[in-house]
Image (cartoon, rainbow, N blue to C red):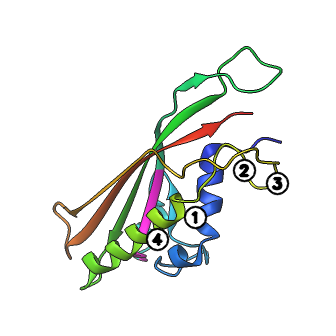
Amino acid sequence: MSVSVEQLLYQGLIATPAFTSLLGIDAGGNFAFYDKQLPQQNFNAGTQVYPAGVYQRITSPRLFYMGPGSNQATMGRARFQLTFWSNAPNGTVLLDQIDRAVKSFFQTFDAIYPPGSPPTFIQAGFTSYDSRTEIEPQTQPTLQKLVINVIFWFSDR
């Protein structure tokens, strides 16, 4: 059974203690890291959990074919955006720690040969990584925001 790039990224980050130790825990006992958006039930019930983050695939063009048995492109570059928010008084410091933990994770992340497959080479963790801090507009109290854009090689095989 193949695993999506989103699943590889999520499972890898959630298995990284340096990353999860910095996140909040939601009402369901899960780390506050979600696919595409923060769950609305957390806010509707008045239970705002921070630091929290989301991940989203922006694009994933397949660029070439690698390996036997296919005539379709199976190798490509995935671009993801990860966004994190914090309402802590030291939110900028906390977001910087999250940024460092995510960057460290991506330095060894392998989306070509996921765990359990026999690698023939280990890919470079990412081809591009940039991050910036911002303030989420019109929020009280002020929410600090971290936006990470990362591009890495992946395979559909």
| Residue that sits furthest to the bottom in the current view | 89
Disc 4 to disc 1: CB gap under 8 Å: no
Relative horizontal placement of residue 92, taking residue 44 as reference (left or right): left
Residue type, label 1: Leu
Disc 1 to disc 3: CB gap under 8 Å: no
- Residue at image mark 3: 116
Pointer 2 or 1: first along the chain: 1
Disc 2 to disc 4: CB gap under 8 Å: no
Per the rendered image, the range of residues in magenta is 47-55
- Residue at image mark 1: 13
- Residue at image mark 2: 114
Pointer 1 or 3: first along the chain: 1
Work out whether residue 50 can be spotted: yes
> Marks 2 and 1: which is nearer the front?
2
Pointer 2 or 4: first along the chain: 4
| Residue that sits furthest to the left in the current view | 138
State the image quarter where residue 88 is shown.
Answer: bottom left
Disc 3 to disc 2: CB gap under 8 Å: yes
- Residue at image mark 4: 101
